[in-house]
Image (cartoon, grey):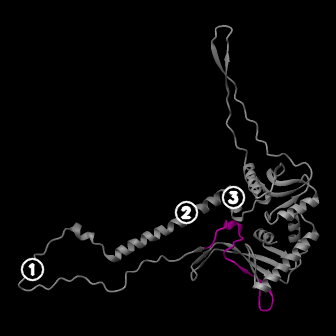
Amino acid sequence: MDNHIRQLLSEENRLTVPQLGTFATHHITAQILKDEGVILPPRKQVTLDDTEQEDSSNAFQNYVIKTEKIGVDEFNQSLKAYINKINEQISQYGLYEIPGVGYLKRNAEGKLLIENNTDYNLLNTAYGLPKLYARPVQVASPPKGKSVKDEPAQQTTAQKQPAPTKTSKKESTVNVPADEQSHNSTDKVWWLSMIPLIMLFIFLIYLMVDETAQLQFRAWISGDYQEQIITDIPSEESTDNISIDENTNNSNADNSTATELTPKIQPEPMQPAITESKGGYMVVLGSLSKESAAEKLQKELAAKGIQTEIVYNSERKTYRIAITGLSEAAAKSKREELLPVVPTAWVAKPNQ
């Protein structure tokens, strides 16, 4: 439930969760908190009204049912368990955290509120930028105490005073005042501290220009491998034409050899690991746009003792890592068994 709430709040400005309340988001521009020395990027601020707990459109219920592939009864049971967990943790620890959103608390009157966490950012156009800490550069202060210069011993009248020596202009410019040296070192430290900010600015420009990079960055931040984040299907990698040289021997006439070049052979297009699924329910553990990534995930699951197959979905052009050939009851049971290992596992109907 937490993941569904976070996903919907990142896409919508209003969300009603039955038996809990209505969440609302408000766009907040970037802020500079001078007292705390913090720079906050643009973000969404979330509020909660626990008095409004009914939604005639059942948007949250329909979204969970469609995403989890469950029925209304299963949704109501999951929702009831979720509300009980929230109340138990608040009564025991004083708060309940919705990862990526904030903390649920009750005030003195028992009203349920949400406290925003500035480490989280639900605004998709902020590209997952964290808050920055801006602290002034500390310049090393000179050691305390009064410096004592060596004073020449007083000369008696009997001693002969040496004649003053003339110093050239070059020698006179070598001695730089201490204030100027401190100013130069401060400038160097300032420029060195600006280098990471410049690199960050260049990276942001790159994300704004390249849409593919935006999708990859969002997927990397969220760690979500489900089908709904796969919007860019890479084209098949082209392979070079292969030429084959064959030598033919004419031994009947003059035993002379001639080399003939055969025409270039076009490689056959790459085929998916497995064609379309043919009947039977399946438990999908991941859905990726590249076959190589699917094979990598299949090996990782095999190392955990989970044997899977790679099923190609031509409609969405994705590679599913799944346990196939199951009945509906067996698929649901297998999904519940794998949830501790793969929380995002879901059941797909035949030919779905």
Q: Reading the chain from its start, which is encountered first: label 2 or label 3?
A: 2
Q: Farthest top residue?
A: 253
Asked if residue 111 shows in the view, the reply is yes
Residue that appears at 85% across and 80% down: 84
Main secondary structure type of the part rendered in magenta: loop
- In front of the other: 59 or 89: 89
Instruction: Rate crowding at label 3 as few (under 14), some (14 to 19) or many (20 or more) other CA atoms within 10 Å.
Output: some
The quadrant holding residue 38 is bottom right
The quarter of the picture where the C terminus appears is bottom right
Tag 1, which secondary structure? loop
Q: Is residue 291 above or below residue 180?
A: above
Q: Is residue 65 above or below residue 297?
A: below
Instruction: Quickly name the residue at label 3.
Output: 216
Q: How many marks?
A: 3
Instruction: Quickly name the residue at label 2.
Output: 199
Residue that appears at 80% across and 63% down: 344
Segment tinted magenta in the rendering: 106-131
Q: Name the spot of residue 9 as percent of width and height, x first.
A: 77, 71
Residue at mark 3 to residue at mark 1: CA–CA distance: 81 Å
Q: Reading the chain from its start, which is encountered first: label 3 or label 1?
A: 1
Q: Is the residue under label 3 in contact with that under label 2 (CB below 8 Å)?
A: no
The quarter of the picture where the N terminus appears is bottom right
**Amino acid marked by disc 2:** Met
